[in-house]
Image (cartoon, helix red, strand yellow):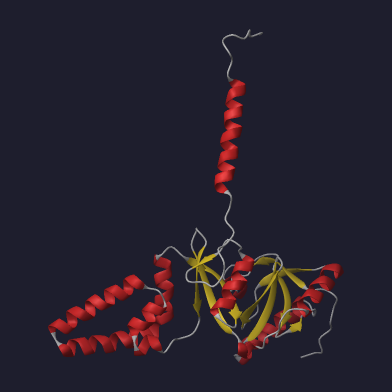
Amino acid sequence: MSEKQEGNFLLKINKINSGSHAANNFLKPDDIIVALDNQIYTFGEKQLTADLKELKKSSQKSMLTVLRDDTFFNLLVENSLGCKFVTTTAEETSKIKSVYLSEEIHDLNELKEFIGMRDVYRNYEVIENANSLSAGIFPPFWLAYSQKWWILLLFTAIMAVSISVNIYIFFLGWLLTSIYCYKAQLNLLYSFSMLEGKVFCIKILSKSIDEAQKTIRKLDPKSKFKFSKLPKPLVEEVEKDKKEDNVNKNNSNKENIVDENQTVIV
């Protein structure tokens, strides 16, 4: 590979191709590519595409740092993004570099990948993209930890019926369920969330689920999480807006009403 030629600009996503690696990672137009494996990336679009394609060939993964609005977050990438880019101005580039250099830097091996899912009411569920041994050893504990209470209730009822019929049926059912939960646990968690009306919305690298929630809250100040250490999110002043609309409506109606005692000039 030829030596990289550093420029004085960063890459900003202009358009994302459908089904591309960028789309699968939930990137958006106007997201800015800031760094690759903690190195500020000012080498241009062709070099970025070549570097990411090399990951695919060598079956490796890298950490891509992205700036969305005023928030930096990290992604796990393993192929070219499939985007069309524009470049940032020299002033924008200088400002972003300055802010990024003040951010806390983490190596890829320190981070875990999390998948964020949300519904229309901005209720989020953050799922670690890794298999948990507890799902295979003791499924009820895994279901309780994952807060899938109705599935836990159903599992408990089925196990209670099976043990009342035959102890061997109970052990066989437990074994098969443990194997299935361990092998398919991520798909199960995604499916349970989809049944609750949630859809995939973000992938993110973070040290813990708490840190992942903090980053998502920065990206979406109205995001809500179950059993989170974060404070309550910002709430739209819907009632205030409704009252203002009603006052304006009443005033408008009053203006349109003609008093019987007044003389109407046509």
Residue 137: quarter of image = bottom left
Question: In front here: 139 or 214?
Answer: 214
The structure residue drawn at horizontal position 56% and vertical position 35%, both measured from the top left corner, is: 246
Residue 155, can we see it? yes
For the N terminus, the quadrant is: bottom right
Q: Nearer the viewer, residue 36 or 20?
A: 36
Residue 52: where, in percent of width, then height?
67, 83
Q: Residue at x 20, y 80 (%)?
A: 160
Would residue 17 be visible to someone looking at this image? no
Looking at the image, residue 240 sits to the left or right of residue 1; the answer is left
Which quadrant is the C terminus positioned in?
A: top right
Reply above or below: 42 against 89: below
In the figure, is residue 166 to the left or right of 153?
left
Give residue 35's quadrant in the image. Answer: bottom right
Residue under the point 44% across and 73% down: 190
Drawn side of residue 99 relative to residue 141, left or right? right
Point out residue 169 in the picture as x, y percentages from the top left corner.
18, 87
Label tally: 0
Which residue appears at 48% of the width and 66% of the height?
199
Residue at the farthest left position = 165
Q: Observer-nearest residue: 18 or 259?
A: 259
Quarter of the image where one finds residue 85: bottom right
Relative image position of residue 139 (x, y in whole percent): 34, 84
Residue 57 % position (x, y): 62, 89
